[in-house]
Image: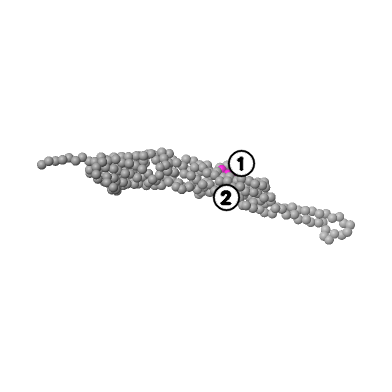
Amino acid sequence: TFTQDVGADATHTDVTTDANPSVYGQAVTVQAQVRSAGPSSPTGTVAFSVDGDELCTTDLVPGTAPESSAECGIVDALAPGTHTLSVSYAGATGFDPSTGSLSQTVTGARTATVLTPPPSDAVFGEPIPLRARVDVEQPGFGEPDNDVQFSVDGAAVGGPVPVEDGVATGPTISSLPAGPHVFHAEYVGDTRFASSDSSVAERIAPAPTTTALSSSGNPLTAGNPLALSASVGTPPPGT
């Protein structure tokens, strides 16, 4: 009789993602392709990890020989920066183990700030609340939670106010003189969510007035002095 020892086929593991670079909050799928040096597609399992922390372990799916593949989705948001995505193929009968890795770059997600415009018919003395909404733009995900700074005509109004549930509510102002003004809101970004801003130009009209005239007597007797008085007021919303 004759015994022939047949060694296991060497394998090579490649790692890719469906988005590199990606942004904060973006869903990323890690893909592994294991290729055999022999004629057959590798079998067995592969383990995925991020920066040394295990993501998942899944079975290889045979493809066009001599390749097999597997994938794993990253559910938790990766912090901005550079991360090492690693795949370890454990090997199987007839196939040697192998590993692969890549560097995944994550940047801050873009945001959109929308300033609520003042009423188009606002008048001098009318209270004008400052309010802005801040949302993350796709493919990013999450809720921006840093501060918004409001300003009018380039001058800050109050201090930075936090974004809560997507909205920043600033001071209410009522001392703007009549004339054109530029209202501005700027979201102060961080490493997760980029900064953004919004401006609105609006004219404040002079407040309307009412004048009431009264006299000292009506009817007036000839020869008696006449006294006239006038009362001038501002109806709401002006003050």
Q: Position of residue 182 (x, y in %)?
A: 61, 45
Q: Is residue 54 visible?
A: no
Residue 229 lies left or right of residue 13; in this view the side is right
Closest to the observer: 33 or 174? 33
Q: What residue appears at the point 46 percent right and 42 percent down from the top-left corner? A: 108
Closest to the observer: 186 or 8? 8
Mark 1: amino acid? Ala
Q: Position of residue 154 (x, y in %)?
A: 61, 41
Prevailing SS of the magenta stretch: strand
Up-down: is 103 above or below 63?
above
Q: What residue appears at the point 66 percent right and 47 percent down from the top-left corner? A: 179
Q: What residue appears at the point 17 percent right and 40 percent down from the top-left corner? A: 5
Residue 138 lies left or right of residue 67; in this view the side is right
Residue lying farthest to the bottom in this orientation: 219
**Which residue is under mark 2?**
116
Quarter of the image where one finds residue 24: top left
Q: Earlier in the sequence, mark 1 or mark 2?
A: 2
Range shown magenta? 148-153
Q: Position of residue 48 (x, y in %)?
A: 33, 43
Q: Is residue 4 visible?
A: yes
Closest to the observer: 56 or 120? 120
Mark 2: amino acid? Thr
Magenta stretch: includes residue 151: yes
Q: Position of residue 159 (x, y in %)?
A: 57, 42
Closest to the observer: 67 or 72? 67
Magenta stretch: includes residue 2: no
SS class, disc 2: loop
Q: What residue appears at the point 10 percent right and 42 percent down from the top-left corner? A: 1
**Which residue is under mark 1?**
155
Residue 102 lies left or right of residue 213; in this view the side is left
